[in-house]
Image: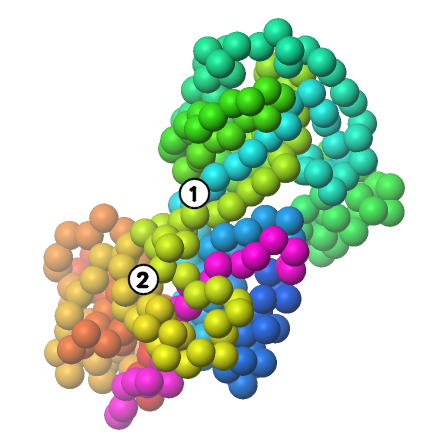
C-alpha cells in the first residue's frame, strides 16, 4: 500500500485579474500544467479580481472542504445609481442625488448595521442555479425569479474611505455572501441606491492573496512550487489526527478506526508522517473514512 504522495497534487492560490471568468483561469492553469485535473473552490465575477484557490491533481477531491471557508473583500460602491446586475456591467434602473446630503457618520452607521447574521436576497444576475439553469441565463432572457433570502453572516464590515458618491469598504463574510447585493442593500438603507464598481477578494479562510500566483506566472514552475499549498495544510481548518500504519490500512479498506479525542468538528483530517491520508467523520469513539488518499 502506497500513499498517493506527489500525485496527491496541491492547492494553488491564484490572483485572478479583472476580466476573465473563474473558468477561464481554470483553463489557463490546465494548459500551463498540462493536466485536466484542475478546479476552483469559489467563483469570482469576471469584473472582480483576487484570490481563487485552485485544486490541482488528486487534490480536486478536497474542493468540497474549501468552498465553505469565510472570505474577505475590499470593495468600492457608487451611491446614487442602481443597476440590473448590481455592478457596473448592468443597465441603470434608478438614479438619486440623495447622497449629496449624507455624512461619513451616517454611512458608517449603516455599514455597522449590516454586521452579524443576516438574510440576503441573491442578485438576479449570478451563477446560482434554479432548476439547473444559472440565474444570469434566466435574467438575460428577461425572466425574473422571486429568489428566497439566504442566511449569511457578516463578521466584519469596515468603512475604508469615502469620497461621495464613492464609498470604499472591507468585508469579511461567510461563504455564499454576494458583495454586490450587500452594496445594493447598503444603498437601499441609505435611501439612495447603489451598485458595486470594484471588488477584490483578499482572503479565503487563512489564505491571503498576498501568497497567490498571478496568471502571467503560470508557466513558472519554480514559482508554482513555492506558492503551492500542501493538501494537509489546505485543510488546516479541520481538526487533525496522526495515525499508525495499521490504522492507515484499515482506513484504506473503508473500515472505521478507534478515536476517543474530543473534536470541535464532525470532520477530521487524518495524517501519517505529515501526509494527508483521509478525511474522516468523527463518531462516538470512532472515525469513519469519507475520502481516502492512499492506494
User: For numbered disc 2, what is the local secondary structure?
Assistant: loop
Q: Which quarter shows the N terminus?
A: bottom left
Q: Is residue 7 magenta?
A: yes
Asked whether residue 40 appears in the rendered view, the answer is yes
Quarter of the image where one finds residue 149? top right
Compared to residue 42, the image places residue 176 above or below, namely above
Does the stretch in magenta take in 27?
A: no
Pinpoint residue 217: horizontal percent, then vertical percent. 48, 72
Residue 84 lies in quadrant: top right
Q: Which residue is mark 1?
A: 72
Q: Circle 1 sits in a helix, a strand or a loop, which is it?
A: strand
Q: Is residue 80 shown left or right of residue 11? A: right
Residue contact between numbered discs 2 and 1, judged by CB atoms under 8 Å: no
Which quadrant of the figure contains the C terminus? bottom left
Write down the residue under mark 2: 235
- Report the residue at 15% width, 83% height from top: 245
Q: Is residue 113 visible from the viewing direction of this image?
A: no
In this view, the residue in front, 30 or 221, is: 221
Compare marks 2 and 1 and give the one earlier in the sequence.
Answer: 1
In this picture, is 6 found above or below 55?
Answer: below
> Closest to the observer: 135 or 285?
135
**Pair 2/1: label in front:** 1
Q: Residue 101 location, x and y as percent?
A: 62, 7
Numbered range of the magenta stretch: 1-21
Q: Where's residue 6, x and y in %?
A: 33, 85
- Residue drawn 68% across and 38% down? 87
Judge the density around disc 2: few (<14), some (14-19), many (≥20) Cα neighbours within 10 Å.
Answer: many
Q: From the top left corner, tell me how far across and down residue 267 is, in percent.
A: 30, 58
Amino acid at each position: 500500500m502506497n500513499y498517493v504522495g506527489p500525485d496527491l497534487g496541491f492547492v494553488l492560490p491564484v490572483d485572478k485579474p479583472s476580466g476573465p471568468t473563474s473558468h477561464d483561469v481554470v483553463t489557463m492553469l490546465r494548459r500551463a500544467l498540462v493536466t485536466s485535473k484542475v478546479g476552483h473552490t469559489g467563483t469570482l465575477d469576471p469584473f472582480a479580481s483576487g484570490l481563487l484557490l485552485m485544486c490541482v491533481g488528486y487534490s480536486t477531491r478536497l474542493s468540497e472542504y474549501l468552498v465553505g471557508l469565510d472570505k474577505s473583500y475590499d470593495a468600492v460602491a457608487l451611491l446614487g445609481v442602481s443597476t440590473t446586475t448590481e455592478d457596473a456591467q448592468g443597465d441603470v434602473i434608478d438614479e438619486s442625488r440623495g447622497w449629496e446630503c449624507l455624512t461619513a457618520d451616517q454611512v458608517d452607521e449603516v455599514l455597522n448595521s449590516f454586521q452579524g447574521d443576516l438574510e440576503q436576497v441573491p442578485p438576479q444576475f449570478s451563477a446560482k442555479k434554479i432548476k439547473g439553469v444559472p440565474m444570469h441565463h434566466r435574467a438575460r432572457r428577461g425572466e425574473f425569479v422571486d429568489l428566497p433570502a439566504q442566511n449569511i453572516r457578516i463578521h466584519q464590515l469596515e468603512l475604508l474611505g469615502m469620497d461621495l458618491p464613492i464609498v470604499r469598504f472591507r468585508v469579511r463574510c461567510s461563504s455564499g455572501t454576494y458583495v454586490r447585493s450587500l452594496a445594493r442593500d447598503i444603498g437601499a438603507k441609505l435611501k439612495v441606491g447603489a451598485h458595486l464598481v470594484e471588488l477584490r477578494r483578499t482572503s479565503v479562510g487563512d489564505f491571503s492573496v498576498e501568497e497567490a500566483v498571478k496568471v502571467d506566472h503560470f508557466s513558472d514552475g519554480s514559482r508554482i512550487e513555492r506558492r503551492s499549498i500542501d493538501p494537509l495544510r489546505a485543510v488546516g481548518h479541520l481538526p487533525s489526527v496522526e495515525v499508525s500504519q495499521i490504522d492507515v490500512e484499515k482506513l484504506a479498506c473503508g473500515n472505521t478506526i478507534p478515536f476517543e479525542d474530543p473534536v470541535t468538528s464532525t470532520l477530521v483530517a487524518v495524517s501519517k508522517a505529515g501526509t494527508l491520508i483521509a478525511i474522516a467523520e468523527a463518531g462516538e469513539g470512532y472515525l469513519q473514512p469519507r475520502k481516502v488518499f492512499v492506494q
